[in-house]
Amino acid sequence: QVQLMESGGGLVQAGGSLRLSCTASGTGLQIAAGGWYRQAPGKERDMIATISSGGRIYYTDSVKDRFTISRDGAKNTVYLQMNSLKPEDTAVYYCNANFFGLSRIYWGQGTQVTVSS
């Protein structure tokens, strides 16, 4: 069974950093494209960063120059490096991905990021 598992969330002070990981398991297929989303309490889930199968990267304006998305093919993992964190970055962070050879998009279960002021 294909699964995506996020890790790396936690509590950090404003100005601090965290690195989130999204690792695929249950398949020998490689991640093609991946993305990170977040959902704050009472708000919709928003896309914040994506990386295409060709390496094209997109960031929403609120995280540009602070967050970096990357991919490690050998570990079948997509990362989100988050620097200069702000209290408004507090949310549950989700990753999604699709795989070469599969059309379905898979989601992780989410990891909580809390930034204290």
Image (tube, grey):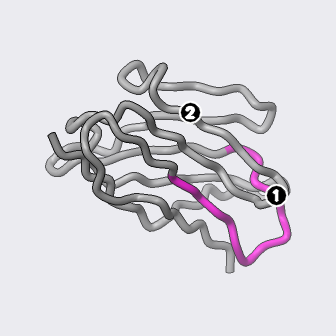
Residue at 71 percent of width and 35 percent of height: 52
Residue at 57 percent of width and 25 percent of height: 58
Where residue 88 appears, as percent x and y from the top left, is 22, 36
* Quarter of the view holding residue 33: top right
**Local secondary structure at mark 1:** loop
> In terms of depth relative to the viewer, which is nearer, 79 or 1?
79
| Segment tinted magenta in the rendering | 20-33
> In terms of depth relative to the viewer, which is nearer, 83 or 63?
83
Q: Which residue is mark 2?
A: 68
- Whether 112 is among the magenta residues is no
Above or below: residue 48 compared with residue 58? below
Where the C terminus falls, by quadrant? top left
- Whether 26 is among the magenta residues is yes
Instruction: State which tag comes first along the sequence, 1 or 2.
Output: 1
Q: Is residue 71 left or right of 90 when viewed as pictured?
A: right
Q: Is residue 52 left or right of 83 when viewed as pictured?
A: right
Q: Is residue 98 left or right of 96 when viewed as pictured?
A: right
In whole angstroms, how far apart are the C-alphas of marks 1 and 2?
Answer: 20 Å
Where residue 98 appears, as percent x and y from the top left, is 69, 53
**Local secondary structure at mark 2:** strand
Total count of labels: 2
Q: Of the residues shown, which amino acid type is indicated by label 2?
A: Thr
Above or below: residue 49 compared with residue 23? above
Where residue 83 appears, as percent x and y from the top left, is 43, 34
Label 2 crowd (10 A; few <14 / some 14-19 / many >=20): some
Q: Of the residues shown, which amino acid type is indicated by label 1?
A: Gln
Residue at 26 percent of width and 52 percent of height: 114
Res 30 label = 1
